[in-house]
Image (spheres, rainbow, N blue to C red):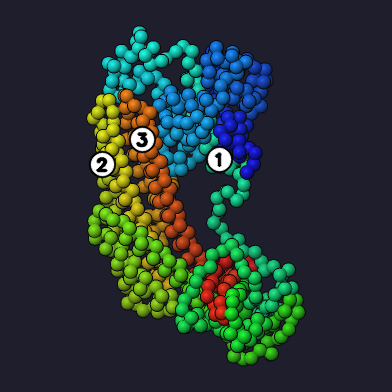
Amino acid sequence: MTEMLGRLLGGDLYAVLSLATNAELDPLVKIITAKLTNFLDVKDEYKRYQPNHRNYHTLIGDELRLYGGNSLMNLGRGVEGPSYDEIVANVCWKLSVPYEKGRTVENEANLLDIFLEQRWRTLNPAERDLLAGAAREAALGKTSEKAWYARSGAAALATTLFTGPGSAVLGISLLDPSYKVTVPCVLHVAFLRRKFLEEGRAGADEAKRPSTGEIRVEPVDKSDEASTTSLELHDDGGVRLLTIRDVPNMGGRQWSRIGDADDAGVGRLNSLVQAVPALGTAAEIAGATGTRYMEVVCNGDLMKAAKGGGYRAMSRSGTKITEHANLFGADKLSLVVNATALMNVASVALAQKHLADISEKLSALKKEVDSVADFQVAGRKAILTSSIRYFEQIAPAVLAGERSGGLASRIEDCEAKLLEVQDHLAHDFAKAIKELQDLKDGSWFSSSEYVDAIERQQHQLNDLSEQQIMCLRARALGWQLLCEFPDGEITKRRRRDDILASLDELTASGDRLRRMDAALREKLRNASSLWSASAMNSRKLGIMRTGDKFLTKLAEEGGRIMEGIKESEEDRSALQRPFRMRLMIEDGRVSAVQPLEVAALA
């Protein structure tokens, strides 16, 4: 962690100001200089450099702190305002927002979450700037308690409290901090801090930055060849097309366990292992114990080379050629040199990886469907459950090569039923959103029952969204199985596009989640309590945080489904491009495979 990141996470005011651009500092300067009593616009640095605010960002922080205390107390501190943490706590107190002294960043987050009209993650940069300004204005409006209570329906009582001795009852003093400066400024600093942390502007550790999800395949490292044994295939021009070599344990990427040792596909993988003379005879490998690893690297188009005149095969130990093709037994060489056979073996490895992946996802999805105790319509659960069970049943056969028209037809039947469920869920979701938007607060002094109704509606929307993502997961797995069948490419592509479009609505910026969050926040903004504003805001925050966690989980699940579709498509095109395939061999048989990596290989 860099020093600046530590300061940013620790609630340091000056760390935020030092990272801000002139445009980002400008709202603070305008708020401060709008007050006739400010000292900023008489400072030499301001006169010399403005509007290049970065040159005097420390003075901006000092001025904000002065406005955070009253004049007499500032004199007692040596003409210095209170700490920024104290200012944030005072602003939270003024606005009845829950806070805890010493937890500056968390207190800022509470302010943002109360006054931002939309969920942070749903906003693009331009929207964030716009709504940050709206949040400042909304918070500033709350500093006028008289107007606030009037809006909540207690105008007569508010008039009494704010006239004559009423202000003394509320503890309002002419020596209070200038909230017209501190409230909007703290909201803006809170906005900037969250923005900078998300952007990584403070120089966060690379390990903590989000992964791009890209797979980068490095060329075969020739420096490793001195300590490995390998089999190579070259074309007639001497270009190396294929390398099969012994490697150490390749950590970092997940292994997918593959099927039964008696399966025909796994048997072909075992034959590939045993066909590499440099790595031991078939008998030696078959009788081996323990775990070893092999890597298959295809650097070129094997089929093209075969049509153009065939291959030259050689075995290496380190940098030395130990055997040429004519030294191989015909039974071994035929498996490795025949391009169709080799690609078939790679296809088997890929199919086994897909089977392990699909089986794991189907099993997890079945458990999640079973855990949902109360589907609003029982028939939906039955359709999801029956589709998952059928996909589990046929997946091993389909991925082993059984591609009958009957199987494809049953997959299509499941798709039609799942689409029907998805449409019903979308209809019920729109209805639940409308019910939330139509909620009215009929109380004068406390919105507790109104907030209860909002929370019930939130639970209903969450349930419907969760069922929707389950339905889309099942459709995506059905699509993966359908893609194993020949032909029908237009149907496969259009189905993929439809699933992705539906998933896009469930991303952080998707239309479904934005509407859900916006409706929830709009209703919560109208909730109030004359006698316990802080408790009411605490409850609002709890509902929003619960919603945020759920929406984040939902968006992440949608992202994983999208990534699974993308990976499946990449795998299917892998065998037409250079690829790297790693195998785990346990007791002489292939037991696991890592996902194919595709790139231009040396």
Residue 266 placement (x, y as % from top left): 50, 80
Tag of residue 389? none
Asked whether 453 or 38 is in front, the reply is 453
Specify the farthest residue to the bottom: 330
Callout 2 touching callout 1 (CB < 8 Å)? no
Which residue, given by chain and number where applicable, does mark 3 sit on? 539
Which residue, given by chain and number where applicable, does mark 2 sit on? 435
Task: Relative to 162, say whether 428 is above or below.
Answer: below
Discs 1/3, front: 3
Q: Secondary structure at mark 1?
A: helix
Q: Is residue 511 visible?
A: no
Callout 1 touching callout 3 (CB < 8 Å)? no
Q: Residue at x 45, y 52 (%)?
A: 556
The image quarter in which residue 548 lies: top left
Asked whether 242 or 203 is in front, the reply is 203
Which residue, given by chain and number where applicable, does mark 1 sit on? 197
Specify the farthest residue to the right: 320
Discs 2/1, front: 1
The amino acid marked with disc number 1 is: Leu
Asked if residue 182 lies left or right of residue 336, the reply is left
Asked whether 147 or 66 is in front, the reply is 66
